[in-house]
Every structure is written in structure tokens, then in C-alpha cells.
Image (tube, coloured by chain):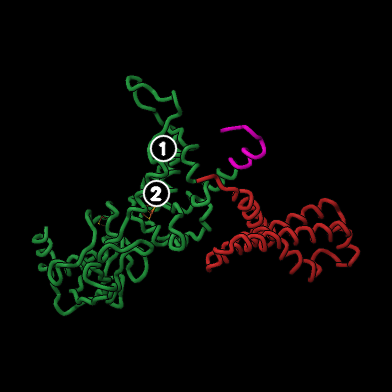
Amino acid sequence: MATRRTCLWKRGVKVSETFEMEIFRYYPDKDNEPFIKSYEVPFRDDWVVLDAINYIKDEIDGTLSYRWSCRMGVCGSCGMMVNSVPKLTCSAFLKDYPSRKIRVEPLQGFPVERDLIFDMDDFMNKLTEVKPYLLRKEGEEKPLEEGEYLQSPAELAHYKQYTLCINCMLCYAACPIYALDSNFVGPAAIALAQRYNLDSRDQGRNQRQEVIASHEGIWECTFVGECSVVCPKDVDPAAAIQRAKVSSTLDWFKEKMIPRSKG
Amino acid sequence: MSKSNEPVLWFLFSAGGMISAMVFPILLIITGVILPFELAGEVTFERIHNAVKNPVVKLVLFFVIALPFFHWAHRFRFTLIDIGLKPISFLVSLLCYGGAITGTIVAAFILWKI
Ligand code: SF4
Ligand code: FES
């Protein structure tokens, strides 16, 4: 991989133009504190921030650690703060930073493991907490031989947008509430819960409500809306949360006004 | 985790927000343009007084005044919590919603007296 990529940038080098990358570095075993280190990389029109970081790793400093995989905005692993804005670094072009200088830091709001790599355990736990799989009520599961649960295109359209999430966590890094209180279930996990709640084949909403309708669920959200601004896949998690607020409010009135009615 | 009782507060908050967004612009036009420029005939104390005396108008005014109080209370509570008053969040809630309830009672009383 490294050799092929080296060829890529050697082919069109314009040596005269450079770009300054200020990178957050931290190696807990060696460094007492994180620090910012500056690197000079060639500037190329078609380079994204991730290309520049790969260049640093391959040509300047092999100890730099970060996550990436697909290089095409699909895997969701290359999220970083670029000039304090959460970005997929494989989709952020150098040419969009005319000052020819950027600062790259790990996504904010998460503990740093090393350099640009942060600890995502909290997010992973939150994803499993909302039970992101089709749930059926007891005794209502179809036996295998009866085939799949059918769904119309209109029913699919109800939740499709929420299936597009790539778990990049940019929305968590953008959320001021999560930064203040990491107990908040957070945008992507709530959008994922909605993805299943709105699926015509699913019957697990009541189970998910235990987490979603708790204080740490949707009610911590004050509708800042930054999650939807930074989301690279237009999932619109903020809308998912507001919709969940409306339906949870209806639930609440049903439960309080009509005692014993369990929906 | 237990289900939160936040929905009732959020309901008042969003109802207040909705009313502010929909009714306030109309009220601004009525009280800021139509009345002062007398675009809908002469404005006298009697005329306005009679209009507000109408029970339907009173009811509308009550909601238009009371719900935005709760909108404010909810928003302000979260603003205070977010700037670091979480440790005294109970007191914050008490002051915010208490303020909204007081405002509502005062508004109801005044409307009643008219
Ligand atoms: S909702 Fe959007 S920003 Fe959040 S994790 Fe999914 S794709 Fe990323
Ligand atoms: S490397 Fe996969 S999304 Fe950027």
C-alpha cells in the first residue's frame, strides 16, 4: 500500500508549493502532555487532509498514529478535528484551506489513546445499548420457513435516511452536550434507535425507550443542531432526536392520562 | 435508567416556542403597525378594552402570554445548567419554572380582572 501511494504523490510533485500541517501528538508512555508538532508537506490540488497525513507517516515521521481505511467516505474511521471542526479527513480537500495551514487534532469529547487515535468504547457501548437490530414481540417471530418480513418502498422510506450512518462519530465531537456530560446517549445512537423504531418489521420500540426516554437519552438534548451540520451522510440525527421527543411526549401523556394503557 | 418526566416540560416549551413563532409576528404587526398608524380605524381605550374583554380574546391572550413563559423557563434552565450550574440544577429548575408559574398566575389574574 505504502509503495503505491508514494508513487501517487511522486508523479505530480510541484515542489515549490507546500502546506503546513500542525498535528496533535501524544504518546502516553513517553509524553507527559500532548503537544502540537508542525510538518511541511507538498501541496497538491487533488489532495485531501488524509493524503497529507499519510505523506507525513510515510515520508517524514513513521510514529504518527491515526485511523483510516476506505479513503472514500464510507468506513467512517478517519474523523478528526480539522481547524477545530469535525471532518472526515478523506473528504476534506487541502485546497479548501487557502491559508495553506491547518491544525489536525483527534475528535474532541473522547479520551485520547495516542496521537490522533481516541478511545471509542463509550460510543460502542451506546450503540449496543439501543439494541440496533430487529426485535419482535414474544411469540410473534415468524418461523424461518415462512420467509422474510416483507416491506413496501414507502415503509422503507420511513427510516432509510437513518440507515446511512457510518458511525464516524463526527456528530459526537460536534455536540456540546456530549462534551459536558458523556452520559448523554448522543446523536448517532439515537438516530440508530429511530432507524429500528420506524422500521415496519420491528416491534422493539418499548425496549429501546428504556434508554431513549430516560433523562440521559433524548431529554439531555437542547437541539443545538450541530450534529446534523457536521454529519457527512445527511443522516440528520438532530431531527431523529426531535422526532423521538415528540413520540416520547405522546407516550408520556398516554401513560399518565390513561393509566394502565401499555402501548 | 428510568423514563424521565421531562416530556411535560418539553411539551410546554415546544408549545411556547410554536406560539411565539406563529403568533408574535402577527401581534407585532397589530400592535406595532396597524394600531399606531390607525390602519383599521380610530384607536380608543374603549375599543381595545372591549376587544380584550371578550372571553375568547382573553383565552387566546392567556395562552399567548403563559406558554412563552414556559418556553423561556426551559431554555434558560438548560442555559444555566450548560454554563456550569448543574450541581444546583434543582434550585435552577425551581427558579425557572417557579418564575413561569408566577408569571402565568399574574397574567391569569390580570386578564380575569379586565
Ligand atoms: S449520524 Fe452522521 S455524523 Fe453521526 S456517526 Fe452517523 S454518519 Fe457520522
Ligand atoms: S477513510 Fe473511510 S471514511 Fe475516511
**Magenta segment: does it hold A261?**
yes
Residue A98 percent coordinates (x, y)? 30, 75
- For residue A252, which quarter of the picture? top right
Residue A172 percent coordinates (x, y)? 40, 58
Chain B, which colour? red
Which callout, 2 or 1, points at the residue further toward the start of the chain? 2
Instruction: Read off the magenta span.
Output: A251-263
**Residue where numbered disc 1 is placed:** A156
- For residue A14, which quarter of the picture? bottom left
Q: Secondary structure at mark 2?
A: helix
Establish whether ligand 1 lies closer than 8 Å to the Cβ of label 1: no
Q: Secondary structure at mark 1?
A: helix
Query: In the rendered image, is residue B79 in sight?
Result: no
Q: Nearer the viewer, residue A37 or B90?
A: B90
**Residue where numbered disc 2 is placed:** A126
Q: Is residue A98 above or below residue A161?
A: below
Specify whether A11 is left or right of A122: left
Specify whether A21 is left or right of A211: left
- For residue A93, which quarter of the picture? bottom left
Specify whether A27 is left or right of B31: left
Q: Is residue A240 above or below residue A100?
A: above
Chain A, which colour? green
Distance, label 2 to label 1, CA atoms, is: 25 Å
The amino acid pointed to by label 1 is: Leu
The amino acid pointed to by label 2 is: Lys
* Mark 2 nearby-residue class (10 Å; few <14, some 14–19, many ≥20): some
Q: Label 2 is found on which chain of the structure?
A: A
Q: Nearer the viewer, residue A92 or A175?
A: A175
For the point 50% across and 61% down, the residue is A224
